[in-house]
Image (tube, grey):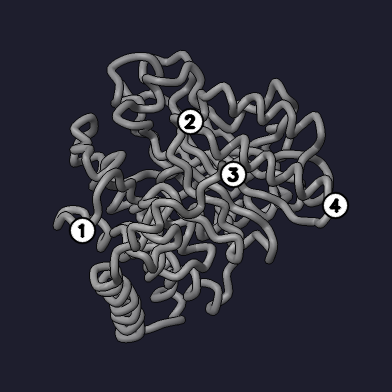
Amino acid sequence: MAVAKTTTRAGATRPPRGSRADKAAQPAAAKQDVTKSDVVADAAGTISNEAPAIAEFDRETEIAVYREMLLIRRFEEKAGQLYGMGYIGGFCHLYIGQEAVVSGVQLALKPGDQVITGYRDHGHMLACGMDPKGVMAELTGRRGGYSKGKGGSMHMFSVEKGFFGGHGIVGAQVSLGTGLAFANWYRNDGRISVAYFGDGASNQGQVYESFNIAKLWRLPVIYVIENNRYGMGTSVARASSTTELCHRGASFDIPGEAVDGMDVRAVKAAADRAAAHVRGGEGPYILEMLTYRYRGHSMSDPAKYRSKDEVQKMRTEHDPIEHVRERLIARNWITEDELKAIDKEIRDIVNEAAEFSQSDPEPDAAELWTDIYR
């Protein structure tokens, strides 16, 4: 018998709490399809038709978003290839499928705002404008990398681009992102910080300590929960007693909403609301992005905890890049030949980055003694 679904916030659907689908036979319960809606929840959690659930893009913005998401996708695909060939060692967490989240949020930010995230971080770096060559070179441990080849996939940084790191410790970036917001509040510089973390990290104690202090001092921080349905190899429904992660700030009086994280327009609209809230001195805001990763947790994860049919369904029905492509074609804003040209240009950029990451020299041994605090 089909299980009815309830709608929460920006059109995201989930099985009703307490239902058989919510409790048993996981990971089937984690297969939460993302749908679109014309309604959006206000900060108190009620449904309103006053604000748009999605942003309207003009041709220039639509194409720019398409290019950025495609760059992230092609970059990650190439990183996966290089990992398989042995050029990238250690851990490598790919962002394939989640491109709309960081691309949409970035559209709501201003110069000087800061971004911080966890270990699934390459897409965030590229969205912040970091050079693909420097990112790829860091993955292969070369001196031209953003951390001089000493950090690898999870440890890159660019003050110039407002990117304050990927962090390997689960949830560590949340307290650091709150610290960035404190600095902005203290300086009264009008900047905001965005702290990204996943559904798995949402159960960390330091997350709630950060929520508490951020609300107490009304710090200008947006907490973005990238709920891709699986933390490590376990579905969110198996690991979390409550799966509506947008409500995790309720006990601290922090507003939040769930967003269709596979639609870059919905992400942009929600990020605009959140940014206006925190810039206005109202304190923190939580955005739960309902998204999906196509690959395993990391390159070493075979992802046997979910079916191939589930992944294919998401790719076929909800792919964020394909949706933008379809809109561009439907509106006669671009031709197939122009799309092919963009794809070739992006592939050339990524291939150039890959070649650089293999030909650039490794760090000098003396680098072992630099950038060390005593």
- For the residues labelled 3 and 1, the Cα–Cα distance comes to 30 Å
Q: Which mark is residue 201?
A: 2
Q: Is residue 59 visible?
A: yes
- For the residues labelled 4 and 1, the Cα–Cα distance comes to 45 Å
Depth-wise, is mark 4 or mark 1 nearer the camera? 1
Whether label 3 touches label 1, CB < 8 Å: no
Q: Amino acid at mark 4?
A: Asn
Q: Quadrant of residue 69?
A: bottom left
SS under mark 1 = loop
Question: Residue at the spot x=44%, y=58% of the render?
Answer: 147
- For the residues labelled 2 and 4, the Cα–Cα distance comes to 29 Å
- For the residues labelled 2 and 3, the Cα–Cα distance comes to 12 Å
Q: Which mark is residue 188?
A: 4
Depth-wise, is mark 3 or mark 1 nearer the camera? 1
Q: Quadrant of residue 79?
A: bottom left
Whether label 3 touches label 4, CB < 8 Å: no
Image position of 347 with respect to 174: above or below: below
Image position of 42 with respect to 123: above or below: above
Residue beneath label 1, please?
87
